[in-house]
Image (cartoon, coloured by chain):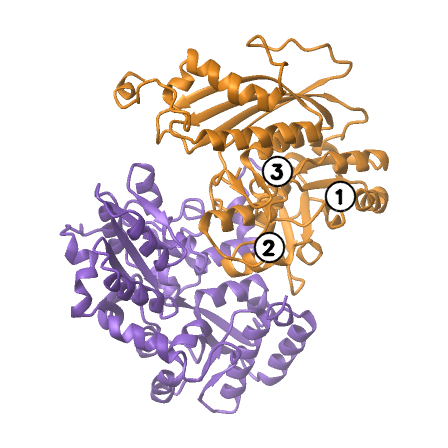
Chain colours: A orange, B purple
Amino acid sequence: MSGETSGCPLPSDDGGRVLLAHGEGAKLTRRLLDEHVFPRLFGTGMRPLEDAALLPPLSGSPVLATDSFVVSPLFFPGGDIGSLAVYGTVNDLLVRGARPLWLTLSMILEEGLPLSVLDRVLDRIAAAARCCDIAIVAGDTKVVPRGAADGLFLSTAGLGQLVEPAPIGVSEIKPGDVVLVTGPIGRHGIAILTAREGLRFEPPPTSDCAPLTAAVAALRNSQAAIRVMRDATRGGVTAVLHEWSRDSGLTLFVDERQVPITPEVRGACELLGLDALSVANEGTMVVVISPEDSIRALAALRDAGYAGATAIGEVRSRGVVPVVVSRALGREQPLVEPSGAPLPRIC
Amino acid sequence: MKYVDEYRNQKDAEQLLRAIHRRATRRWTIMEVCGGQTHGLLRYGIDEALADVVELIHGPGCPVCVTPAEQIDRAIELAERPDVLLTTFGDMLRVPGSRRSLATARSTGARVRAVYSPLDALMLAEREPDLQIIFFAVGFETTTPATALAVQQAARRGLHNFSLLTAHVRVLPAMEAILRSPDNRVQAFLAAGHVCTVTGQEAYEVPCRRHQVPIVVTGFEPIDLLRGILACVDQLESGRCEVESRYRRCAHREGNPQARRIIEEVFEPCDQPWRGFGMMPQGGLRLREMWREFDATSRFTETASICEVDDRCRSGDVLSGRIRPMQCPAFGKECTPDSPLGAPMVSGEGACAAYFQFHPTIQNAAVDSPGRKT
């Protein structure tokens, strides 16, 4: 850091922006925490006192997830980096069969970030955590010189407790099992793309950024035999199916004509030459379920508000390619993993 | 979705396939000019469904693919200048030059940004007055009008930090070159529908008559493609050769006169090297004298190194229809979309990428490494 300090403004609180001194552990750091972070995340009065949180014992297996968030722009139609960080971590725990309990939050702030932006993000983090009933129990704040980050990066760890019966896992999926999605796909990736590139679609596509709490609860209550669940984030449904194929040694089949897609996403994908199957989601998951339970599971999802929940394919015995798609004219062909995302930094 | 679903209707497609089979008394050889059409044909399995009556040869209509490696090297060299931000279409970033692509150059510090339109580059020039914004302009006549417009607007707004590295290409000279080639096998063309929305179809009358070859303006959806192929087969079977359009909802006979005028005002045809074809007479466009100040190659004196393309890549033969992608020895082995040797394996319009993506058996052979579970 020594090379950077010469360009650093004097460590006085200029009120409006994050300064390098806000991250140096002294007075300004305390003021940043006391005036901005703590009141927003914990309300008045309550705040963590130590660097590490001591948590009560669990009655089941602990489930741990970690994630980081570098999305650009920080605010986008349907979401923002703060709620994305909470929901993303919560979803990772949920799809593994856990009840999310605790969250840690690290923030890497870029020098010069308006404090008003930080405040808005913190408000969204707090609201999202309340919505998911998860407690933020530890955190950290660092500031890097201007240009070394893009506004604000977040990093989380989420801890939950396994709820029995847990999904049995990808190794147990069988030919004939049904693949379903909980709603229309591709909304997050397209929302970010249009927001970042200033594409003017009407109506503007919105992200599906949301916790999957109700979806997982509905599936659990339906008592359907869930083999495996996965939130289809980067790489979209395609990436999930490829991973499952690799891990199971089976072929996954998807019928494009059954896949729910909103008109906004469909239009944007047609225009930009993208395949919605490979576009990111942040509140939509793919589930493999035993065929005899699939109708019950879909009904439960729809009753829980997931109107777009649809069976989109099936597990097959291993064929010549790992993932097969049937497109408009019914011809089956490989669904390849895209070599690179059409757009980096979507989450 | 309107204008999409009705052109992907399975029943209509089956009817058209049957009609083509009924009409054809022998196997005809048809070239689809545009890479977008190649992808459509393979994506929907039309090539296989018609294999016994039509051989489809994939044409050179992928502008990214025909951009010579030395032009990409030049772009990299410019992007590495400290005062330059080079912008181009996203497709161009991963295309290998002689040694590197723009994407790899960016990872080592070159300033490169993907844009959706040359007008985005213009906006950058306005926002970043201390940087020289170069737009690496690629594309057929479909994209040329927007580039021409950007130059005119840059002049109007006095943006002296905006310039072009031009690799625009013209479709007609390429079709001529293919027809003139002594080993030409093309009996009819599906002309690129989007190009014709700008150029119109009158210009095709000359090659059509001179070489006695049917030319059918064709769109990109499966029903469009099948209608275009049926029209070609119908002409060939009845011994006619005409220019006709099966893409009337987009391409009008006269094209877009305003767009053509803008191209005409800003650019003039020039001889240009094409990857796979060598020097293409009148195959490119350069800025007219009065706009030359917007030419990046004259603004920045650089030494474009003479380069050798990887000789394992047979993209030239693929682009000119001499071989099919999988006849290239490197296809799916040393050359895959993850580590491409040539542009046709990278581009969204490249023929090699289309084969890699849509042909199950080929992909299986290429992707399934020995260590894979079966």
Q: Is residue A171 left or right of residue B25?
A: right
Q: Is residue B56 left or right of residue A54?
A: left
Give the mark nearest the N terminus, 2 or 1: 1
Above or below, comparing residue A128 to residue B214 in the picture: above
Horizontal and vertical percent for residue B55? 50, 73
Location of mark 2 (residue): A265
Horizontal and vertical percent for residue A229? 71, 36
Horizontal and vertical percent for residue A155? 53, 25
Which residue type carries mark 1? Pro
Location of mark 1 (residue): A175
Label ID, residue A22: none
Local packing at callout 1 (Cα closer than 10 Å; few below 14, some 14-19, many 20+) is some
Above or below, comparing residue B59 to residue B366 in the picture: below
Which residue type carries mark 3? Glu
Location of mark 3 (residue): A243
Q: B200 or B291, which is in the foreground?
A: B291
Local packing at callout 2 (Cα closer than 10 Å; few below 14, some 14-19, many 20+) is many
Q: A123 or A143, which is in the foreground?
A: A123
Mark in the foreground, 3 or 1: 3
Q: Quadrant of residue A204?
A: bottom right
Callout 3 secondary element: helix
| Chain under numbered label 3 | A
Whether residue A140 is visible here, answered yes or no, is: no
Q: Please name the residue shown 30% across and 67% down the image.
A: B148
Whether residue B260 is visible here, answered yes or no, is: yes
| Chain under numbered label 1 | A
Give the mark nearest the N terminus, 3 or 1: 1
Q: Quadrant of residue B162?
A: bottom left
Q: Please name the residue shown 50% across and 48% down the image.
A: A195
